[in-house]
Image: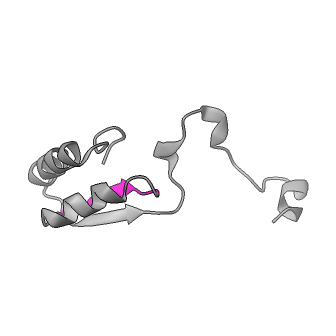
Amino acid sequence: MPRHTYQKPKQAIKNSKLLIKESGADMVKIECNNKNFNIIKSLAEQKISVCGHIGLTPQFISRKNQFRKFGGNSKENKNK
């Protein structure tokens, strides 16, 4: 789901149904954090399949410099 299309349960349900209908998708993917589990629950209650993304979540980045390549030099590689 695009950023800002699933901020509240009612909005998430409406937009998910539209996305599935228009695209023919089997499920929706949203970026998950500990603040939006209620969105996943509301979609599941409506029988909307959800693929939760729990790894890198670029949609939650608010500033460009928060999202960057890491490990590109020997100093960064030693800090693993």
**Residue at left offset 54%, top offset 56%:** 56
Q: Relative to 71, does residue 2 appear above or below in the rendering?
A: above
Residue that protrudes farthest toward the top in the picture: 63
Residue 41 lies in quadrant = bottom left
**Residue at left offset 20%, top offset 42%:** 11
Would residue 27 be visible to someone looking at this image? no
- Rendering coords of residue 32 (x, y %): 42, 57
How many numbered marks does the figure carry? 0
Residue 51 left/right relative to 13:
right
**Residue at left offset 31%, top offset 57%:** 38
- Rendering coords of residue 20 (x, y %): 14, 54
Residue 74 left/right relative to 67:
right
**Residue at left offset 32%, top offset 65%:** 51
Residue 44 lies in quadrant = bottom left
- Rendering coords of residue 43 (x, y %): 21, 59
Residue 32 forms part of the magenta stretch: yes
For the residue pair 8 and 72, the one nearer the viewer reads as 8
Q: Relative to 39, does residue 6 appear above or below in the rendering?
A: above
Residue 73 forms part of the magenta stretch: no
Here the colouring is one colour
Per the rendered image, the range of residues in magenta is 26-33
Residue 50 left/right relative to 20:
right
Residue 49 left/right relative to 73:
left
- Rendering coords of residue 29 (x, y %): 32, 58
Q: Relative to 55, does residue 72 appear above or below in the rendering?
A: above
For the residue pair 63 and 37, the one nearer the viewer reads as 37
